[in-house]
Amino acid sequence: MGQDGSVPAYENASKESPQPRPRLRRSVEDGWIAGVCAGLAHHLGFDVRVVRATFVLGTILLNGLGLLAYLVIWALTPQALDGEHADAPRPAPTSLPRLDRAIRALRTSGRDEAFGNVLGGLALVVLGAALLLERHGVNLRLGLVLPLGVIVVGAVIGWSQLDRAERSSWLNESSFSGRRGVLRVGVGLVLTIIGVLLLATQERGWAGMGDAALSALAVLTGAVVILTPWGLRLWEKVKREQAQAIRATERADIAAHLHDSVLQTLALIQRKADDPAQVQRLARAQERELRAWLYGGGQSAETTLAAAAKAAADDLEDRYGVPVEVVVTGDHPLDPDTQALVRALTEAMSNAVRHARPPVSAYVECGASGIEAFVRDHGDGFDLDAVPADRLGVRGSIVERIERHGGTARIRRLSDGTEVALTLPVHRPVNQSLNQPVNQQTLPLKEAHDA
Amino acid sequence: MPEPRATTHGPIRLVLVDDHRMFRAGVRTELDDSLPVVGEAGDVDTAVEVIRRERPDVVLLDVHLPGGNGRGGTDVILGCAGTTTESGAPVRFLALSVSDAAEDVISVIRAGARGYVTKTIVGEDLVTAIHRVADGDAVFSPRLAGFVLDAFGAAAGEIAEVDSELDRLSAREREVMRLIARGYQYKEVAKELFISVKTVETHVSSVLRKLQLSSRHELTAWAMNRHLL
């Protein structure tokens, strides 16, 4: 009950199930006071004037029973939604909508129909009990007629409120909902009627106290059974509001993220529309960010070799506007050795991005015996003997760094471009001194293997 | 070769399937006259209809498309099963996507796509890829090669004893895949391994066949649990 499925099930069922009569709803727009007569007339298919006359006559001839019934129905019947009674014939324009509004405003938390209904139901029970007590003091026919009227009206309303769809909704068991719903309401009715019969047929005087108590209990049980749908409706409404709140929060999160990322980038792009390179860089960075957000699954960027390599490539792309396609097979946790590998890899990628031609691709393979990493560009290559001075540091920080961590670095010149290959054996003891910064000025150049 | 090679060198008739009009327009401008675009579609149902009517040589297929059974490009390939060109060769599909999700890769390849490239591919490489697919060869981007190495456990050292084994790569196939993952073109792979480009193509097609036919458990489990980097 109250799971996500119950609300759509309710809506579907109410659309599909044949409904010979419209549900009882107060039709405020068409009514004079609270729309009780108009709603009842629409529900029963009578002329609204007949219904009104009945209530007025009932009030005058039956010691106010008509008024009482009116108030009870008012309290228990939900207000018609917009358009629910659109097909009903519209009598004269409402003369007293303000009164209705004022009275409704007096009721607790105005719009909360279900809560109002429960309060109405409780009022009904209290009223019945009060009249029952009065019966012991003043032994009038009124004392019998009023509780009888109240009980019957309550039962009728309870019955009319329960269409097939609602029963299945509050029982939430489609297979036997109809029968169970009928059974429950039927039991309520039987109990109510038994209570009434006991009330009407009991002997007068103190000897009848036991019977009176029994009858009161029966009435109360009946009332509880009849009121259950309203309680459940309230609960369902609370659940629905909870679900809506969760959805709203999620929406707000998504909106906030899109605002901080996508909308900002779009604004930037509009401002830099005349600079294609900038626009492309912004679009790429945003695409990456959005993709990480959509598919990333909240993985921390710096805990594994694969994530670190990817993050380094992204960083380079942001800085230089050249994409590096990084492919990683397997993965390895980051330790000082693999961190050194990532730094060397980053230097190699940075070198390729700044000095060579795209496409630049990097491949990292984490095998059982070691890690291999390759950075491939499509530049003209370079002569190792004629390396410009500013490349010295880069070379040193690649080759020397990886060798001090037990690995090797090779630089190959291909027919089209250059490839840096790094290898690092895994599962070897970690040397504490390895993490010192590289002094780039004094490192000797390593001879690289040309292809 | 698992499929007969097209021997014609006439224009390769293309159909573009992508739900972004802008992207279709962008691809058009990158293609030359030897690659006439004979049809475009933006959703699964239109795509199947256009492909069945036009019978193109190659379909550039986005992985994510509206319509169909909700599986995008996979639905298009399945919906066009058995469609051939005028000359009787099967209509070939080259998947083109921004998606990094492994399940997208494996889904379109297993449905029958001859290759998978990402949308960041440069125009020149795209033209080469289209020609290769039209010739019945497979097109592997570095990313797809990395995926294959991972999915077949080749990166961890699992190697097939015999070439016909479906659940593992042979040593040679692994070498080819590794070089492609490193960004090598087919001719560079050939030079590196001292074999012909044709042999490289044979190896790649063989890997594609294994990718499509293998029931290797990791292939599906991996695709479900992990996203390509």
Image (cartoon, helix red, strand yellow):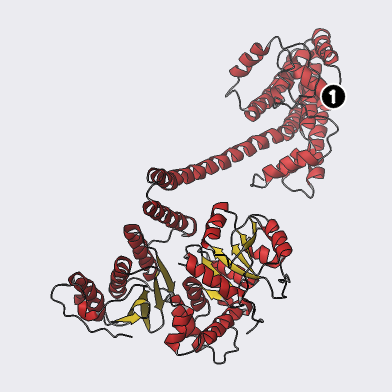
Circle 1: residue type: Leu
Examine the rendered structure and indicate whether residue B60 appears above or below residue A185: below
Residue at the spot 32% in from the left edge and 69% down from the top edge: A356
Residue A280 locus on image (x, y percent): 41, 54
Q: Which quarter of the picture shows residue A136?
A: top right
Q: Which quarter of the picture shows residue A303?
A: bottom left
B101 horizontally vs A158: left or right: left
Examine the rendered structure and indicate whether residue A93 appears above or below residue A299: above
Label 1 crowd bin: few (<14), some (14–19), many (20+), radius 10 Å: some
A442 horizontally vs A363: left or right: left
Residue A355 locus on image (x, y percent): 29, 68
Residue at the spot 38% in from the left edge and 77% down from the top edge: A416
Determine whether the residue tagged by mark 1 lies in a helix, strand or loop. Answer: helix
Residue A182 locus on image (x, y percent): 82, 39
Residue at the spot 79% in from the left edge and 30% down from the top edge: A160
**Which of A381 and B176 lies nearest the eye of the viewer?**
A381
Quadrant into which the C terminus of chain A falls: bottom left
Residue beneath disc 1: A44
Residue lying farthest to the bottom in this orientation: B161
Residue A177 locus on image (x, y percent): 78, 45
Quadrant into which the N terminus of chain A falls: top right
Residue A451 appears in view: yes
Q: Mark 1 lies on which chain?
A: A
Q: Which quarter of the picture shows residue A13?
A: top right
Residue B156 appears in view: no
Examine the rendered structure and indicate whether residue A212 appears above or below residue B107: above
